[in-house]
Image (cartoon, rainbow, N blue to C red):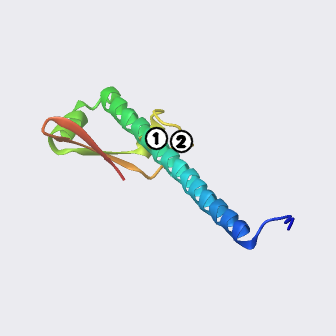
């Protein structure tokens, strides 16, 4: 007997394999996008932290720097934008950088 074409089982197996491959590919692509978002957010936070440190160094009020060392301080991104250290388009205006010291090491919390 000369058969042409595929059996139902062969077609179902092929569809199942293609579905699994499509699912794996989709999950990998979604993970890549999530990782890129996390990296972008980390980079943005590093820029904000650097701008806050520059603000402390350039600030004529030296007591602010000492206050940060002893009891911590808050600097808003709005302040950094007004002083030309950040671009308004690059960051959220409502974020606050809390700078504090723990075991003589400078720490940051951005909220």
Q: Quadrant of residue 55?
A: top left
| Residue 11, disc | none
The residue closer to the viewer here, 102 or 19, is 19
At x 38%, y 33%, the residue is 50
**SS assignment at label 1:** helix
The residue closer to the viewer here, 62 or 15, is 15
Q: Position of residue 24 (x, y in %)?
A: 56, 56
Residue 104 is left or right of residue 44, and the answer is: left
Residue 53 is left or right of residue 25, and the answer is: left
Q: Quadrant of residue 59?
A: top left
Q: Residues within 10 Å of mark 2 (few under 14, many from 20)?
A: few
Residue 79 is left or right of residue 56, and the answer is: right
The furthest residue to the front: 1
At x 22%, y 39%, the residue is 68
**SS assignment at label 2:** loop
At x 21%, y 44%, the residue is 72
The residue closer to the viewer here, 32 or 23, is 23
| Residue 90, disc | 2
Q: CA distance from mark 1 to mark 2?
A: 8 Å
| Residue 44, disc | 1
Where the N terminus falls, by quadrant? bottom right
At x 49%, y 42%, the residue is 40
Question: Vertical placement of 73 versus 86: above or below?
Answer: below
The furthest residue to the bottom: 8
Q: Position of residue 26 (x, y in %)?
A: 60, 56
Q: Residues within 10 Å of mark 1 (few under 14, many from 20)?
A: some
Q: Position of residue 9 (x, y in %)?
A: 70, 71
The residue closer to the viewer here, 1 or 69, is 1
Q: Position of residue 110 (x, y in %)?
A: 35, 48
* Contact (Cβ within 8 Å) of mark 1 with mark 2: yes
Q: Nearer the viewer, mark 1 or mark 2?
A: 1
Question: Vertical placement of 8 versus 26: above or below?
Answer: below
């Amino acid at each position: 007997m000369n058969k042409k074409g595929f059996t139902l089982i062969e077609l179902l197996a092929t569809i199942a394999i293609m579905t699994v491959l499509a699912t794996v590919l989709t999950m990998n692509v979604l993970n890549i996008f999530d990782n890129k978002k996390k990296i972008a957010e980390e980079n943005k936070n590093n820029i904000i932290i650097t701008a806050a440190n520059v603000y402390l160094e350039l600030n004529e009020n030296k007591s602010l720097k000492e206050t940060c060392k002893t009891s911590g301080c808050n600097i808003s991104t709005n302040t950094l934008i007004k002083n030309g250290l950040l671009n308004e388009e690059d960051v959220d205006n409502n974020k606050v950088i809390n700078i504090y010291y723990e075991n003589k090491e400078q720490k940051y919390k951005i909220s």
